[in-house]
Image: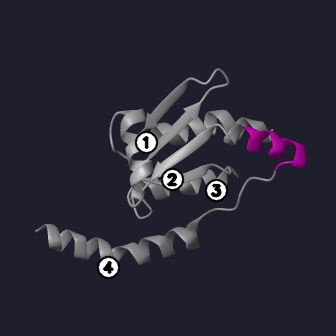
Amino acid sequence: MRLFFRLVRLILTPFMLLAEKLTTPKALERSPAEQYKVDLACQQLALYQFKACPFCIKVRKEMARLGLNIVKYDAQHNRHHRKELESGGGKTKVPCLRIESSNNEVQWLYESADIIAYLQQRFAATTD
């Protein structure tokens, strides 16, 4: 049974990644100064993800729509990032957004809907 699901993932992954590439929206347009501020704020964020996870794809598409340059860590194939996710966030579940505040406190935000809501609240308003 495990081999069956591995085979299904192997077959579907290229199609999922192609669909992501073809359906990713264009980024919001900001002035260079606004984009610079957004880029600085994004340096405090990191997305732990699996490349072909549908929920991770959903978050990456929203990041693209909002024009966010957030570092992405592969927690599926990179043991170091997987271990960081498990030790910091408490579980190996993706997507997970690591949020570091200015006082060096770290929050680990799971669930794609919660991550998207956070990103929209923090960055969508900067386009007004």
Q: Which residue carries the number 3 mark?
A: 64
Q: Nearer the viewer, mark 4 or mark 2?
A: 2
Q: Secondary structure at mark 4?
A: helix
For marks 3 and 1, the one nearer the N-term is 3
Element at badge 2? strand
Residue type (three-letter) at the residue carrying disc 4: Ile
Badge 3 crowding class, 10 Å Cα cut-off, few under 14, some 14 to 19, many 20 or more, is some
Q: Is residue 10 above or below residue 124?
A: below
Q: Residue, x 75% and y 45% (percent of image)?
A: 39
Residue bearing mark 1: 84
Q: Which type of secondary structure does the marked residue at label 1 adopt?
A: helix
**Which amino acid type corresponds to the residue marked 3 in the rendered image?**
Ala
The residue positioned farthest toward the front in the image shown: 80
The tag on residue 11 is: 4
Q: Position of residue 34 (x, y in %)?
A: 84, 42
Q: Nearer the viewer, residue 88 or 55?
A: 88
Percent x, y for residue 125?
A: 73, 35
Q: Is residue 127 magenta?
A: no
Seen in the picture, residue 104 relative to 15 is either above or below; the reply is above
Counting residues from the start of the chain, the first of labels 3 and 4 encountered is: 4
Task: Give the extent of the magenta segment.
Answer: 30-40
How far apart, in angstroms, are the residues tagged by discs 1 and 4?
Answer: 29 Å
Q: Tell me the CA gap for discs 2 and 3.
A: 16 Å
Alpha carbon distance from label 2 to label 1: 10 Å
Please tell me which residue lies in front, 1 or 89: 89
Q: Give the numbered dot on residue 73.
A: 2
- Which sits earlier in the primary sequence, circle 1 or circle 4? 4
Q: Are marks 2 and 1 in contact (CB under 8 Å)?
A: yes
Q: Give the residue type at disc 1.
A: Glu
Task: Give the CA distance from mark 3 to mark 4.
Answer: 25 Å
Tell me the tag on residue 29: none
